[in-house]
Amino acid sequence: MNATRILPDLQASLLCEEVRQEANGNFFIIGVINFLRVPQLPIVAGRLCVFNRWTAGIGQFTENVRLIAPDQTTVLRKGEIKFELREPGLHSTNVMVFSQVEFKAAGTYFIEVLVDDVMKLRYPVPLVLAPPPPTEEKKA
């Protein structure tokens, strides 16, 4: 009996500043984000990318990525990508781009990654308010 559908595994998920692809198909992941340190609030992030790589599945799938506010209910951004895996040894790399994301408060934000409405991963992204130190005025 051949399987006609196997839900894939999420091999990797990274929040980063940029993802680029070389001519040979390999990816450059630029500026992996562990946390966001900002000088003031509110602030707008011009571009955030979520790099996801799926493997070990068979079938057609829908990936959903959500950026959740610290209250854990407000969805700041969400996106959907359809992809297919024809055999378990293959993989699919998806990049979700969120533009002009406004952050209004410090706290822990979350990235949620789902496939066909099944939660595969949820990880924290702390946002820390760290104003620059006061500058010392030169004395005449």
Image: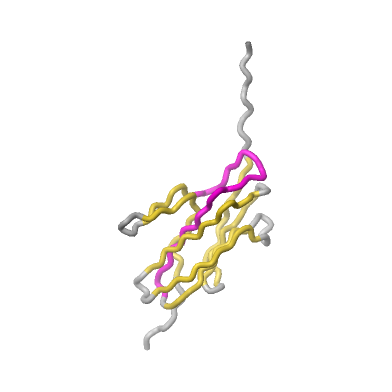
Work out which residue is located at the far top of the displayed protein and give it: 140
User: Whole-percent x and y of residue 114?
Assistant: 54, 68
Q: Quadrant of residue 69?
A: bottom right
Identify the residue at image location x=34%, y=72%.
Answer: 89
Locate the N terminus and report the quarter of the image it occupies.
Answer: bottom left
Quadrant in the picture for the C terminus: top right
Residue lying farthest bottom?
1
Q: Is residue 133 above or below residue 71?
A: above
Most foreground residue, 119 or 24: 24
Q: Main secondary structure of the magenta part?
A: strand
- What range is drawn magenta here? 33-57
Q: Residue at x 56, y 59 (%)?
A: 111
Q: How is the image coloured?
A: secondary structure
Judge whether 135 appears above or below 66 on screen: above
| Residue sitting at x 42%, y 63% | 93
Image-quadrant location for residue 12: bottom left
Position of residue 61 in the picture relative to residue 111 (left or right): left
**x and y percent of residue 47 in the render?**
53, 51
Q: Is residue 49 above or below residue 57?
A: above
Label count reads: 0
Let me know if residue 52 is in the magenta part: yes
Which percent across, then down, holds residue 46?
55, 48
Q: Residue at x 50, y 67 (%)?
A: 81
Location of residue 76 in the rendering, given as x and y in whole percent from the top left corner: 63, 58
Of all residues shown, which one is farthest toward the left? 24
Magenta region includes residue 42 = yes
